Each structure stands twice: as C-alpha cells, then as structure tokens.
Amino acid sequence: MSTEPETAEEAGPRTPDRPEVAPGQPDAPGEHHADGDDGTEADTQADGAREADGTTRTTEATQGTEADSADGERNSARTDTTAVAEVSEAEAELAAQRIERERIERRKAGKTSPIESGAKLSGKAADLLAAVRAVEGGEKPASTVFGDSDPAPRRPAPAPGHRPQPAPTPGAPASKTVEAVRGVLAEGGAPDALAPQVAAVLGEGADAVLRKDPWQLLRAGGVRPDQADGFARALLGAGCGTDDERRGRAVAVWLLEQAAVAGHTALELPVLSAALGRQGVPDPDAAVQSTLASGEALVFQDALEEPGAPARREEQPAGQRAERTTEPGGGPQDDEEGLPVRVLVGLERYALAEESLADGLARLVNSLPEEGEESWREAAREVSGAATELVRAVTVHGLVLHTGGEAARAEPAALLHAARTAGLRVFAACHTPDGCHRLAELLGGDAAEQLVGTVAGLLSGAEGPGRDAEGTLELDLLIVLDAPQLDVESAAALVESLPDGGRLVFSGDPSALWSAGPGRVFADLLGVRACPRIVSRAPDPGPIGELVSGIGAGELDQVAAPGKEIVIVPVRDAGEAVHRTVQLVADSVPRALGVPAGQTVVITPGHGGAAGTRALNAALKERLNPGPGQFGGFDPGDRIAYSPAPGRTMPGVVVKADIDGLHLSCTGAAVVVVPRDRVAGSVRHGWALTAHQAVGTRWAAAVVVLPGDAVQALSRPWVYTAFGRALRHLSVVHGAEQALARAVAEVPAKPRTTRLQTLLRTQLLSSN
C-alpha cells in the first residue's frame, strides 16, 4: 500500500459552499439521513432518532458534515407534489407500492367489523392492539398476548394470468385547494412554496384542517416544531402555548417520522416521552396517550427475548431485578410471569409492513408443495462447486439466507441458471442497475438480461415476470441480492407478491451499510436464525478485496499493493483534501492507471462541510466540466445523482435541457426527463457521492475522502462500503488520523429499533 502523495499542482480549485436553505423550504436531495451513512449529522441523527429528538436533524441539515439517505430523503420526495400529467418511472413505482400496501391491508382485514376509534387497523394488527390495551388495563396477562400462533395455512398456487402495467399516479392537488392553503400559509407567515405539499398531504379541505390545527404544518417536509409554533401563534394568537393538546400530538408524530428517517420502525415509549420533553411538551405521557387515541400511532408490547435482553425474574440475581413500571413514561415492564416486556410506539404504515412481512415469510416457509420437487432435484444435480450447498438448501426450504461479498454473487447466479435450466420460473432482483449488469455478466447468454432486474422495477411492474389476476408474481424462485439495502416496506411488498410454494433467497453482505429506509430486514432475519443461512467462503480478489475483507472483520490491515491498487494520500485539512481529490480524479488516476475521470467516483461522509459532496462537486465541476449552470446549476456533460424515489440513487450524465426539463442519461435506463419544478428536489451533481448513494454500484476507481472534521461519521459499515466501491484502484485522501482504525475496530452499525425479530420469532419459530 503506497503512502506517497502524488505531485501537487500549483493552485487548487476553489471550493464554494452552498447557501443555507431557508427555514421551511425543502432541502436538496439526500440532505436527510436514514442511518448508516453517518456524516457528522449522521451521528447526531442516529443518536437523535434513538432519543427521538429531531431538532438537530433539521437545523444541521445545511452545515457541518451531513449524512445522506441514499439520496432518497423523504422530505425531498414529498416536495414533488406538482406532478405533471405524464406518468414517470418514479411515479409509477410509488403508485404501485401504494396499491400493493392497500392490497396487503385488504388481505389482512378480511371481513372484520369496524374497530373502535384510536386503532384504525383491522385483522391481526387490530387484535394485537386490543390485546396490548387489555394487558395495560390488567384484563389479561401478557403471556396470553404473545402465545404461539398457528402456522400460516396452505393455499393453492393461483393460475397464471396477465401481466399488469404500472398503475397511473393520482394527479396533483386541485389548484383551488392549493390556492386556499397558500392563503392560510400567508396569514401565518409560512412560505407559500409549501402549499402544494401541504395540500397533497392533508387532502381536500386542507386549508380548514390547517386553520383548526396549525401544527399539522409539521407534516410538510423540512418544517421544524419551532417554525410550526410560530405559524400557530400567527393564526391562533398568543394564547396558544406548548401545552396545547394538538401540538403534543403533532410533535409526537413528527418525532416518529424523524426516527423513521434514521431507520427506526418504532420507538420505545420512554425514549419517545423523553424526546417530547426536549421539544417543550409539558406532559409527554398525555401527548402520547392523545396520539394513540387519535389513531395517528399504535402501541405494542413485546416480550424481551432477544439476545442480551434482561433475564426472566426468576433467573435474575437478587437486587438486580427490573422493577415493575406502571407509569407510561417508565422503563421495561413485567408481565404476570415476571417476563420483561418493552412498550413501543410506531406509525401505522411501518407496523403494517412489519406484520405483513412476518406473515408472508411464515407463509412461504409453510407452503412448499410436493409437486415440482423433481424439478428442484434436477436443479440440484446441475450445480457443482461452491453453489451446491445453496441449491440444496433452496430445494427443501422456502426461505434461505445467503451471505458473502462481491465474489459470492457467483453462487446465486449459479442457482438462478440451474433452476431455469430445470424449467422453473426464476428471477433475480438487485438494488441498482449496475448490480443487475454485474449479475447478468455472471449468467451470460442472451436471456440473462430477462432474468435480472431491480427491486424498484419489479415492484413497479416495469421489470420481471407477469402477475396473475390477484397481483401475485408468476415465479417459482425469487433471488433478492443486495438484501441489506431492503427497507421494511419494500421487503413486505416483495414477499406478499410471491405465490404459495415459491422459494425466496435473500443474498447480501451483512457487513455493508443498512437500508436507507426504515428497518433492518436482512439483519433481523439473520438474528432470528429460523431458516438456513449459507455462508459463502469465496474471498474477494486482489489487494482491495483483501483490505475490505479485513475491515469487515474489524481489522485495518496493511495490504501489499504492487500495482498501486491502493494509495493513501495524507492531508492536513479539508481544503487540502478537496485540492488533492480533484488532482487525483482529473490527473493522477487517469495518467498513472488509465482510468478516465468518468469511471472514478468520489465518496465522502456527508453533503455539507468543507469537504462534503457539495464542496467537492463544485470543485470537480469547475475542473472537469466548467459552465454557467444555466438550468438549475447544471450543464450538459455534468455528472449527476438522480433520486427518483426515497432510497434510490441513479448515477448519470446531463444530456441537455429544454422546455420539458433536464434530460438525463442514467445507468440502466433510457433518457430520463426531469421536469423543471423537480430538478432541485431530485437531482444533484454526482462526481462526489455519499456511501449510501454509492452502495450497490462499483466503479473502476474510487477516491474516498476522510476529512478530519468527519471522524465522528466513520463506522465499520461506512468504511467497508466506501472502500468496497472500487474495482481496480482505491485512493484514500486521509485526514482522519487514528480515527479510521478506531472506527473499523470499535464502531459497529448504529442500532435501529424494530419489531420484526419479535414478530418473526412468533410466526416462524412457532410454526416450526
């Protein structure tokens, strides 16, 4: 590994920073974080979400080192409410996901009668909520709530049918509604640019809703509680205060939304109550109860049976037993048998998704038919070598987990080929188009591209096999690669789309960053240990593979790199880091290794700061593609990162700009036209990315920038993911000193609060 810096140029490029975003205005794409991508703000956000304290999350979004949400921030996605009549790929995808969620809800609801106010759920979710309330009221012990459930019943596989087309997206809010909302916003001193977003979120009559409860303004992306307070005072007068019940409810929902941005699907009740107190809510417990009664959030009581959880009362040493807590804001409670439980509060959409995912996985595990087994045995005979164990596991199990690095992708590819050769209906879904391309290269043949697509394309109906009349995929086997990047809603939609008797393989690298959206699906599945896990022993090749493998094990080793595969460039400050990065991309790497600038990616911990993506992209544009930036700061030839939906980033290049919008050539897609009003919210320059934006894609060369002011952003998953984006060459612009080695050795992924493990244990383990 070389540590000699390349020759510096006489003068480096200037590094202008972007002006701060005005309060209440939507941020640029990727400004908010979904955990894992850990800029300075990432640390603050993940810790803040753990405490459900979202203030720093918004106020720091325009300064310091900001973390990203895989350029799929929810706030930016919500600003795109002035949809044009034409249906874009992103609109079709989001609409298809909404329809899928509605289908899930209808399926779970069955024929149950309406439930009481405060639940807004039916079927199993309603039963669970009612049981929790019964426990809280002392009507029944918690042991009856968390008893074993019956395995999911078998049902016949549906007959093949038509292939649905992507569903159209509902139009923008009525202009009359938008204008009415704009008038209310003007009265309260809020930016009128929020009007389309508020009208879309609150629906018809949004102006009346806003007048009645001004704190509903918090439902618009980028609005903080202090800004909503000012808006409320302007509408209601000085008499309204922090003790207003409406404020408590709105802030509680806002905190849960902020926690979701950081990856949590729910928050522990004491954590939520403490965060409400920090937001100036005088009676947090009353605010939580009001939020639950209004049906805007749900409460759950889960038995603490996870590894490391407190032992049962009879197993705890004397003097160390957890006290029974009856106050809403207290700590862990005990059931009548002395088993500690935790009380969680979460938003309905994520509660439904987690329960649907657990139900669907149990259904797959318990619905393997006897017919067709000969085809699977034939598939097993087709495979030899490292993939044999994986194919054998899939032959007899409906759900299989597969772990490994980049080289391990050859094993799912072999499974896909063998199953298709045996006449089975197969498909593989990856996180990015680049991942699809790499998998198709392993498969070879003209039909390879037809067997591989993205998760987003499969869910939207743009890619993949046909569906029957009920919307079920016509598949015998679905392989999902890059599984750590699956958020809970996408995973639920995939599982619900599979037929009974279908096989599902989740394959991915558990050392990589988790999903940009809420949940940690792959990690939860690995933690439950309720299905086979096949661990690949295929090592990633070359010095970069050796370095990244060591990082995954918590070791930052010195690796021999005789061909300059790895170069360390020490820097003293952020300004020098920007200068040396531009030099590497524009001159040193192309000259020494023959890798053009267009095949080199720059990765840095966050968007803000003196060496964040904004500063680096400004400097790289000035050197590589200078221009006036006449169309929203962009010129033809600019490298961009396009975020069509939350959690997705598509690297590309600007082709041209005209009256229709910005024309982009994105990897794995035809030319995408982004309307003028959506450019600021979904497109940013893309020479430099964050690790979450880059995950799932690899480049010939990668330059990873580690400025000294971003040391708190570093973690083992971040370093592992960033360094692993390079195929041939890795340059590390290193100003973090010993913080890099310390992060690799001591800083794991930030924890996320989810319910999936508890639900999976109930569904999968009881059925087995």
Image (cartoon, rainbow, N blue to C red):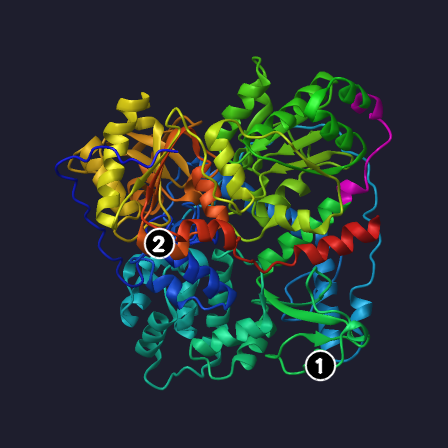
**Mark 2 or 1, closer to the camera:** 2
Res. 463 visible in picture: no
Measured along the vertical axis of the image, is residue 748 above or below residue 160?
below
Numbered disc 1: secondary structure: loop
Q: Is residue 188 left or right of residue 174?
A: left
Residue 499 location (% of width, % of height): 73, 36
Residue 517 location (% of width, % of height): 51, 50
Measured along the vertical axis of the image, is residue 138 above or below residue 258?
below
Q: Is residue 6 left or right of residue 455?
A: left
Which stretch is magenta?
363-376
The amino acid pointed to by label 1 is Arg
Res. 71 visible in picture: yes
Residue reaching furthest to the bottom: 239
Q: Are the two marked residues, 2 and 1, in contact with CB atoms closer than 8 angstroms?
A: no
Q: Residue at x 83, y 42 (%)?
A: 154
Residue 697 location (% of width, % of height): 45, 33
Q: On the image, which quarter does residue 300 sit in?
A: bottom right
Q: Residue at x 56, y 75 (%)?
A: 288
Q: Is residue 232 left or right of residue 93?
A: left
The residue indicated by pointer 2 is: 710
Mark 1, other Cα within 10 Å: few <14 / some 14–19 / many ≥20? some
Seen from the viewer's position, the closer of residues 114 and 318 is: 318
Which mark, by number, is residue 324?
1
